[in-house]
């Protein structure tokens, strides 16, 4: 299990709020993909290493968390078969993806109101406010 701390929570929350500033044109069901999958959370190994240090992550702990999440979601871990994936950048991006999913679970009531239709500005505002209210 990946240890959580306020730095991790704040980073994921801040990233989500920044992406929502662009008023995404997607359905509520696609918001996780828009925020945490369309663009990388971090680019460059050195920047990812800094985030890992800030988040106080151990490399093996992070890899184990990502593998567990992949197996829980898909039944196997696809990325571990790919070459060049065992470095900080893809591991932090993958962890941000899974942690972002957990963050959005906390606002599922607000997302449920626009789950199958394109989010309006009012929907985005409601989701942003719900995320802003979340505390570690």
Image (cartoon, rainbow, N blue to C red):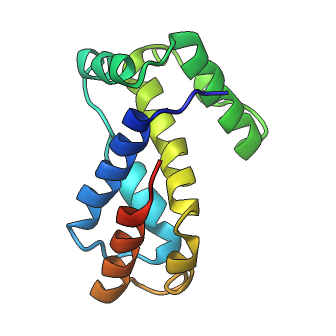
Task: Check the image and name the residue furthest to the left.
Answer: 22
Determine the residue located farthest toward the right in the rendered image. Answer: 75
Image coords of residue 109 (percent x, y): 57, 77
**x, y (%) of residue 134?**
44, 60
Q: Where 53 sits versus 102, above or below?
A: above
**Quadrant position of residue 74:** top right
Foreground residue among 6 and 107: 6
For the point 29% across and 72% down, the residue is 24
Q: Which residue: 50% across, 79% down?
A: 110
Nearer-the-camera pick, 18 or 80: 18
- Kindly identify the residue that appears in the image at 74 percent across and 35 percent down: 71
The quarter holding residue 132 reads: bottom left
Q: Is residue 125 above or below residue 16?
A: below
Q: Is residue 32 left or right of residue 46?
A: right
Q: Would you say residue 38 is visible in this rendering?
A: no
Q: Position of residue 46 (x, y in %)?
A: 25, 15
Percent position of residue 3, x then y: 57, 27
In the figure, residue 7 lies in which quadrant? top left
Q: Is residue 48 above or below residue 112?
A: above
Residue occupying image coordinates x 38% and y 20%: 52
* Nearest to the observer: residue 89 or residue 100: 100
Quadrant holding the N terminus: top right
Q: Is residue 134 left or right of residue 77?
A: left
């Amino acid at each position: 299990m990946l240890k959580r701390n306020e730095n991790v929570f704040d980073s994921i929350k801040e990233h989500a709020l920044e992406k929502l500033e662009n008023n995404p044109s997607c359905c509520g069901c696609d918001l996780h993909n828009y925020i945490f999958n369309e663009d990388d959370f971090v680019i460059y190994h050195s920047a990812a290493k800094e985030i890992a240090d800030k988040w106080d992550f151990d490399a093996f702990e992070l890899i184990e968390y990502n593998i567990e999440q992949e197996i829980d979601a898909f039944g196997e871990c696809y990325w571990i078969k790919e070459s060049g994936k065992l470095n900080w950048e893809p591991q932090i991006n993958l962890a941000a993806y899974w942690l972002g999913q957990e963050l959005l679970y906390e606002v599922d009531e607000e997302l449920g109101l626009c789950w199958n239709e394109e989010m309006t500005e009012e929907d985005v505002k409601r989701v942003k406010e719900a995320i802003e209210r979340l505390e570690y």
